[in-house]
Image (cartoon, rainbow, N blue to C red):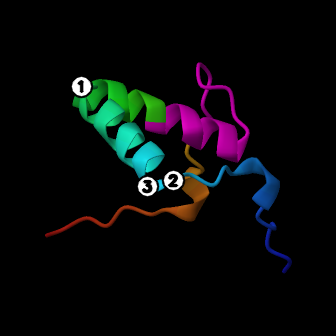
Amino acid sequence: MEYPRLDRTRFKIQSFQEADDQHQYWLTKTPVERLQAAYYLISVAWGFDINNPPRLDRTKFSMRKHG
C-alpha cells in the first residue's frame, strides 16, 4: 500500500513573530469559528464537498447489544 506523499511546496516558513501573530489571530476567534475552519481544512484534505459530506460506511462498524 502506497501512502500519499506530503507536498512540501504548500507550506510557508514563518518567523517566530509570524507564528505568534497567527496564534493570536486564532485566539480572537470563537471556538465555533475555529472548528468551522478545521472542518473546512479537513474537507479540503479529504477532497469532499463541505456542504455534502460523505456518509459513514456502516459496513465497517457493528453495534453490540448489552444485556
Q: Secondary structure at mark 2?
A: loop
Viewer-nearest residue: 66 or 57: 57
> Residue 7, can we see it?
no
Residue 58, how many percent across, how many down?
55, 52
* Residue type indicated by callout 2: Ser
50 part of magenta stretch: yes
- The location of residue 35, given as percent across then percent down, is 36, 34
Measured Cα–Cα span from mark 3 to mark 2: 4 Å
Answer few, some or many: residues within 10 Å of disc 3's Cα (few below 14, many 20 plus, some between 14 and 19).
Answer: few
Q: Which residues are magenta?
A: 38-54
Q: Position of residue 41 (x, y in %)?
A: 57, 38
Query: From what the image shows, is residue 26 above or below residue 8?
Result: above
Structural distance between the alpha carbons of marks 3 and 1: 24 Å
Residue at far top of view: 51
Q: Which residue is mark 1?
A: 30
Question: Would you say the residues marked 3 and 1 are in contact, meaning their CB atoms lie under 8 Å apart?
Answer: no
Q: Which mark is residue 16?
A: 3
Q: Nearer the viewer, mark 1 or mark 2?
A: 2
Are the residues flagged by discs 3 and 2 in contact, CB closer than 8 Å?
yes
Q: 17 and 61: which one is in front?
A: 17
Q: Secondary structure at mark 1?
A: loop
Task: Determine which residue is flagged by label 2.
Answer: 15
Q: Amino acid at mark 1?
A: Thr
